[in-house]
């Protein structure tokens, strides 16, 4: 039997990045997109162009920059979304418009307040408009897993007749069970013969922990595209973890009898890169990429591994690209060594960015003599973490802090908030608390600083200060931000302002939905 080719569709930069706390800057999205291309992903869903100027710019830059990969943008089933999506993806070698509308009873009646017939007509118009721009059009009946089978088939049939080339069946709220989801895919093939002439895709969420299992069950039922995110990030409990899907398909090729075009040796660095940029740590017991995956503590396991690794390992560390650490960076290291180290971590940067990092490494080496691997990664993260002009709703113009023994720390700040200059002062238990309180006097009061963490990357009193914070809003969404500086107070201010901008960008994006 000939092997089917499974298309891997990565939505880390769209669905994954929609998870509060995981938002990325335009520069960071470009870095991730480059690494996804090296991994061998077939389709990169780069964002939701109409959501914000930052999203639009990110999709546009990725479309212009990343070659050999289909670049996709998301659009609701209306003219404005589809037009804006095309404006962003049109620069790609292989552009795709992905449009969607909800079809389940609860969504139709409670959210959209549309009849079945109206949903089908909207679907037809949206797909035809997208098709007028590009040949590659994907359509999703949102919340398909809770849509009646026959109505789902009616909507899919209308989308295919209107020109859709990929039909995605999403389990939007992670409701399905694997056998049930597989039956849904089979039912679609049985009742919509036209489905055999297009790509049938699946997009599963992990609310019940079944995202990967549902995706793999769908492959066995005939689906030929799987959508997911690196490290399984995403809204709520996340999306199907692409690295887990990939290694299931590779490790159990005897069971699935399919082909994929992925370089599995890029998995580990892709996972590490995303974790470094989002600040979302990888659990030690995370399948495929967790620190414990290739660790064996039990004596009987250790004995077996020493005799033959296959006794307790079904994958080798180098299968997923875990190679250990080899390069040491010092005062005289050049940009080639630094570039090589960062490539091992998934950072494939521009010459200008490498030069910036090299200069920062040399400055650091002059002060602390030895620059360790984590220092270089932190500097790279800081360089790629810069916000674009469009993403900076709040800017720090200047600040001053006054502190000493037997005096209350006092700070003053001058900010530019949505273009308007704001000045404030504050006091606190320490200099960081004082400057934070001053900033908060002129910022949206619904934003709260929930957590503040400071660590020295490496070294002693001259070490780089790595500040990470968590903010929350009135909806209890969490926003994570990190910043780096040799000065603790500067690093703190940069992290707070960056976190505020991430929260405001998310708020602006939600207002457009």
Image (cartoon, rainbow, N blue to C red):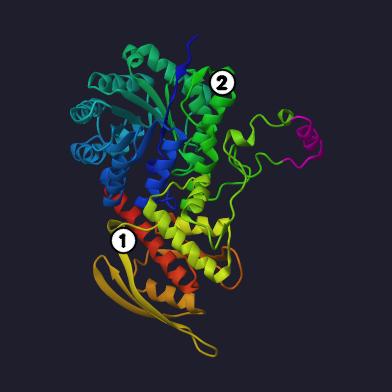
Query: Would you say the magenta stretch is mainly helix, strand or loop?
Result: helix
Residue 151 placement: quadrant = top left
Looking at the image, residue 299 lies above or below residue 118: below
Q: Secondary structure at mark 2?
A: helix
Residue 188 placement: quadrant = top left
> Where does label 1 land, which residue?
392
Q: Position of residue 265 (x, y in %)?
A: 54, 35
> Where does label 2 land, which residue?
253
Q: Secondary structure at mark 1?
A: loop
Q: Nearer the viewer, residue 91 or 14?
A: 91
Looking at the image, residue 282 lies above or below residue 92: below
Looking at the image, residue 384 lies above or below residue 152: below
Q: Which residues are magenta?
A: 296-308
Q: CA distance from mark 1 to mark 2?
A: 47 Å
Q: Position of residue 306 (x, y in %)?
A: 78, 35
Q: Residue at x 47, y 11 (%)?
A: 2
Relative placement, left or right, of 161 versus 502 is left
């Amino acid at each position: 039997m000939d092997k089917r080719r499974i298309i891997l569709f990565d939505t880390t930069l769209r669905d994954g990045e929609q998870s509060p706390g995981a938002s990325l800057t335009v520069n960071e999205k470009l870095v991730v997109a480059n690494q996804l291309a090296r991994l061998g992903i077939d389709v990169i869903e780069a964002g939701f162009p109409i959501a914000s100027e930052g999203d639009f710019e990110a999709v546009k830059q990725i479309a212009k920059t990343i070659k050999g990969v289909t670049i996709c943008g998301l659009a609701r089933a209306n003219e404005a979304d589809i037009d804006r999506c095309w404006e962003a993806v049109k620069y790609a070698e292989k552009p795709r418009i992905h449009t969607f509308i909800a079809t389940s009873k609860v969504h139709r009646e409670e959210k959209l307040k549309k009849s079945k017939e109206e949903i089908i007509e909207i679907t037809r118009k949206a797909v035809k408009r997208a098709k007028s721009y590009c040949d590659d059009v994907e359509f999703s009946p949102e919340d398909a897993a809770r849509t009646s089978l026959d109505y789902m088939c009616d909507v899919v049939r209308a989308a295919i007749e209107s020109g859709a080339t990929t039909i995605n069946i999403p389990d939007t709220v992670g409701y399905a069970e694997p056998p049930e989801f597989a039956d849904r895919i089979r039912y679609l093939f049985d009742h919509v013969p036209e489905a055999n002439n297009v790509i049938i895709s699946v997009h599963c969420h992990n609310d019940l922990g079944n995202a990967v299992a549902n995706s793999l069950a769908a492959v066995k039922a005939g689906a030929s595209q799987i959508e997911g995110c690196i490290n399984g990030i995403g809204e709520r409990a996340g999306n199907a973890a692409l690295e887990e899907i990939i290694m299931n398909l590779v490790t159990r090729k005897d069971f699935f009898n399919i082909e994929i075009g992925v370089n599995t040796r890029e998995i580990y660095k892709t996972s590490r890169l995303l974790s470094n940029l989002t600040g979302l740590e990888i659990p030690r017991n995370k399948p495929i990429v967790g620190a414990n995956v290739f660790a064996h503590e039990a004596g009987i396991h250790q004995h077996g591994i020493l005799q033959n690794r296959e006794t307790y390992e079904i994958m080798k560390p180098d299968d997923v690209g875990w190679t250990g650490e080899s390069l040491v960076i010092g005062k005289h290291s050049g940009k080639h060594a630094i570039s090589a180290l960062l490539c091992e971590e998934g950072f494939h940067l521009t010459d200008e960015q490498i030069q910036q990092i090299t200069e920062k490494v040399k400055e650091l080496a002059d002060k602390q003599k030895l620059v360790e691997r984590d220092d270089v990664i932190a500097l790279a993260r800081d360089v790629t973490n810069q916000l674009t002009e469009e993403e900076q709703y709040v800017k720090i113009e200047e600040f001053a802090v006054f502190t000493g023994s037997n005096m209350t720390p006092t700070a003053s700040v001058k900010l530019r908030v949505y273009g308007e200059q704001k000045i404030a002062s504050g006091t606190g238990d320490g200099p960081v608390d004082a400057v934070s309180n001053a900033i908060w006097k002129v910022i949206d009061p619904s934003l709260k600083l929930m957590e503040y963490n400071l660590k020295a990357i490496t070294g002693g009193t001259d070490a780089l200060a790595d500040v990470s914070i968590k903010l929350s809003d009135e909806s209890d969404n969490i926003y994570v931000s990190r910043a780096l500086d040799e000065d603790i107070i500067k690093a703190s201010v940069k992290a707070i302002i960056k976190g505020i901008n991430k929260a405001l960008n998310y708020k602006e994006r939600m207002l457009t939905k």
